[in-house]
Amino acid sequence: MNNAWFFLLAGLGSWALTGFLRRYALAKSLIDIPNARSSHTIPTPRGGGLAIVIVFLIGLPILWANQAISWQSMSSLLGAGISVALVGFLDDHGHIPARWRLLAHFCAAAWGLFWLGGLPPLVVFGQPVDLSWLGNVLGAIYLVWLLNLYNFMDGIDGLASIEAVSVCLGGILLMLLTGHANEWPMLLLLGVAVTGFLVWNFPPAKIFMGDAGSGFLGLILGLFSIQATWVAPQFFWSWLILLGVFIVDATWTLTRRFFRGEKIYEAHRSHGYQFASRSWSHKPVSLAVALINLVWLIPIALWVGLGRLEGILGLALAYLPLALLAGKFQAGAKEQ
C-alpha cells in the first residue's frame, strides 16, 4: 500500500461523501432550524459527520491488513465506533431517550476498553499507580464524558472539526518525537477524514456534523488516549492537555449549571465558546481554538510526553489560562 495515496484518497473520499450527505440531508429535510438555543441563524443540513465515520471505519481494516495497527486496536475502534455512530445516526433522524443513549455509550466504552486491555497504570509524580478494576470503571466514565462533551462543544461552525484535526496532529507529533513511529497511522487516518469534512464545515458551514459524528469523535479520541497510555504512561497527561479546550469549557460550564439546579443534558447556549461567538463570530472563535492548540497546548503536551515536565504539573500549567478564558467569557453563566 502506498501510504501517501491511501491517506489522500481517505481525505478526498470524506470530502466527496460529505457533499453526498449534504444532498441527502436536503432531500430528507434533515435540517437544523435556528431557535432560541441555537448558535447559528441560517437553516443548515446536518449529519455530515457520518462521512468521517464511514471513511475512518473502512480505513481501519486496510491499516490492519497492512500491519499498520494491531487486531486489538482495530477491534476496539471498530466495535465502539460503530455502536456510537449508529446511536447518533438514529438520534439525528428521530429521538432516542437520554437513558438509552447513555446505556449505549457505556456499552461502547466497555467494548473499547476490553480490547485495549482496560485503563493502563498511570504515573503520578514519578510513581506508577495501578487502579486495577476501579481503573476500568473510571476509564468507562472518562470515555463517556469525552463522548458527550464533544457533543456539547459541537455548537459553532468548524469548532469540533478543528479540535479533532489539532488533537490528531499533536498525537502524531507526540509519537514521532518520542520514537514510537508505528503508532501514528490511525491518528492520521482520522485527521484526514475530518479534514475532508471540514472543507464543508468551515465557517460559514454548509453542513453540520450531527450527533453521529461528534459523539464518534469524542469516543475515538478518548480511545486513542488510552492506547497511547499503554505505549507510555505519561502520554495520558499529554492527551488530556491536547483535549484541554473542550475539557475545560465543557466541565466548567456543566458544573456551574449543575450547581444552579439546571438540567445539564438540556440544550443551552452557555458554553464559553458560545458566549465568545456571540461577541465575535464563528470563524474567529474556531480559529482562536486552533491557535491555542498549536502554540500552547501541543508544545506543553510534547514537553510532558518527552518526560521533561511532570504530567500533573503540565496539566495545571496548560489548563490555567483556559480556566481564565472560561471565566472571562462567562462559561456556564445564566443566559439572559
Image (cartoon, grey):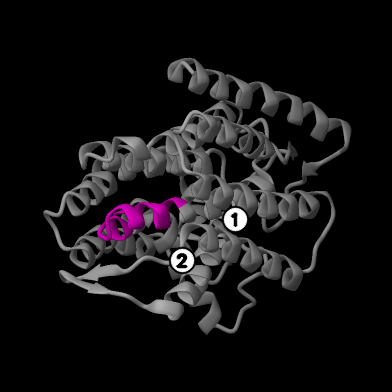
Q: Residue at x 16, y 63 (%)?
A: 310
Q: Nearer the viewer, mark 1 or mark 2?
A: 2
| Label drawn at residue 62 | none
Q: Residue at x 18, y 66 (%)?
A: 313
Amino acid type shown at disc 2: Gly
| Label drawn at residue 151 | 1
Instruction: Give the left or right position of residue 36, taking residue 135 as reference.
Output: right
Residue 183 spot, x, y in % from top left: 36, 40
Q: Is residue 282 above or below residue 13?
A: below
Q: Which residue in the rendered view is the most extreme toward the right?
A: 28
Q: Earlier in the sequence, mark 1 or mark 2?
A: 2
Q: Which secondary structure is most common in the magenta stretch?
A: helix
| Label drawn at residue 118 | 2
| Residues shaded magenta | 224-239
Q: Is residue 215 above or below residue 251?
A: above
Instruction: Give the alpha-carbon distance from disc 1 to disc 2, as whole Å.
Output: 24 Å
Amino acid type shown at disc 1: Asn
- Give the mark count: 2
Q: Can residue 203 be seen?
A: no
Instruction: Give the left or right position of residue 150, taking residue 306 as reference.
Output: right
117 and 228: which one is in front? 117
320 and 124: which one is in front? 124
Q: Residue at x 33, y 59 (%)?
A: 236
